[in-house]
Amino acid sequence: MNQNIVFLDQVELTPVSREALEGVGTVRTVPVTAQGDLLAAVRDADAIMYQLFPHQITRPVLELCRRLKVIGRIGIGMDQVDLRAAAARGVTVVNAAGTQAAAVADHAMALILCLARNVVTSHTALLAGDRRPPWEYMGCELDGKNLGIIGFGAVGRRLAQRALAFGMSVHAHDPYVPGASIEQSGALPRSLPGLLAGSDFISIHVPLTDDTRHLIGADQLAAMRSTAYVVNTARGPIIDEQALVRALREGVIAGAGLDVFEEEPLAAESRLLEFDQVVLTPHIGGWAAEAQTRTQESVAKDVARVLRGETPVSPVSGGARPAAGTTPPVTVTRPGPRERLSEPPTILAYVEWDETGLAHPSDTHPFGTVPALRRMIETEGPITADRAYRLYVRGSGSTRVTKLARRKLDVALKRLLDQNQVQIDELGTDPENHTQRVLRVPGTSAVSVREIGSRDLYEVPLNEVAALIEQRLDRYPKASHDQLMRYVLNTYGWRRLTDKARSYLTAAIRLMYGD
């Protein structure tokens, strides 16, 4: 198929993105510098993509697009697209929800730290030759302070993880998230007035909608403690900037950390530049290299899916959006009886499940473990404890299983075992990892086990491997050939898919299908 994919600004594509898009069409870049030039650029497009395009994709433009099927925003916010008009025209809109969550949470935490310890003020003074004594830059510890998070979606939850690690008490307001879910993440649910009145730092993580525009105005700022700071890495107009300037000038609050503004770029004459107690950055929250690669490739793959007539992973709903920074809960459904197919079709690779939060608890911090660990085991099927721990911690925004995280996960696993919500098959003893355990839901088929390190994969009977693959396909009927192989390797604790292993596992798959 040769469809027309139009970029509205210059984007350097990664090899993965380029391969995904060029597999379904021709990629063209038509930089649009004025709103009046937009229609000519997109009239015959099958797909529109943009990253920093500054103009509006309006209803009149959409109504005159003859072939448009999908709009892909290489980012998160969708302020520039008329979503209702797109839905009415049958145009799918995709973004990359969740792919920048860790980066933005990092940046919000960085602003909080800068405000707490006067990092920017003291740095600027040193550069200017000012050698005032250190006590003139007296800051405060974060340990024991209250952080209020407005909007408990992907970014808000990750910020909670970071704040809890600093010893802060986390409070959250989000009318679209059940209180029990907030509590599972280690935070306490609060009303907005209660959060404003009780927080030392407040961080905003909601989308910009009619309901959230100037959500924080003069009345809300007046309700905050005089020693409190407000941080905004979401959208500038969520805070009434004039009211914020007055509050800073009059000492109503102690300061602010802002990555976003009512008008961007920030004007050189902005009164926000007058205050030492304000830390400003130019909307860089999501601009971490890893996050940008993840974002671009996620959107490119989704655009390609839509152009192939498939369902995207990260669609954006049309019409009114909720006023809180939430993503809808994922419902995991179990497939019915599986038809015998000559070839197993494909599903998303696990790395892409990570982006949607489907297969692991990306919405919980590492110490709110029990419900999320149970869900992972239910979703994944038989899985080694070591692998479950690695996936859990990665999904919680970290990179390695620390001793503390392992202890917490062990406690959660014991609780699941005591409640008969998980069954453990022993894999034997290994000098490095001690007892290896396969976790599964009670009542499911047992996994035959081998001692890791002293036995070869190829000593596992072929029919045993075939049975394990059968279990996996009952859970994920569209698993690909390679995904099934890697699943078997992960279950038994082997780490590499060698050519020899590939041949052996292919034989097991053929045995299943009667080849």
Image (spheres, rainbow, N blue to C red):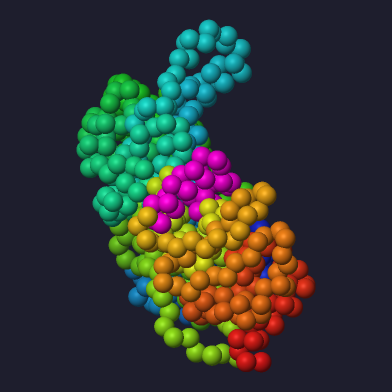
State the residue in front, 29 or 366. Answer: 366
Q: Residue 45, percent across and down?
A: 54, 75
Q: Is residue 41 visible?
A: no
Span of residues in magenta: 392-417
Image quarter (top left, top right, bottom left or bottom right) of the C terminus: bottom right
Residue at 46% in and 36% down: 165
Q: Residue at x 32, y 66 (%)?
A: 319
Visible residue check, residue 119: yes
Magenta span: predominant SS is: helix
Q: Is residue 100 above or below residue 135?
A: below
Residue, x 41% and y 57% (percent of image)? 417
Residue 265 picture location, percent across and down: 49, 42
Towards the viewer: 200 or 426: 426
Q: Depth check: give the residue in front, 415 or 1.
A: 415
Q: Is residue 424 above or below residue 103?
A: below
Q: Quadrant of the N terminus?
A: bottom right
Q: Is residue 406 magenta?
A: yes
Residue 83: x %, y % from top left:
37, 66
Q: Indicate the quadrant where residue 261 lies.
A: top left
Q: In the image, 443: left or right of 449?
A: left
- On screen, residue 505 versus residue 148, left or right, reads right
Image height of 4 relative to 423, above or below: below
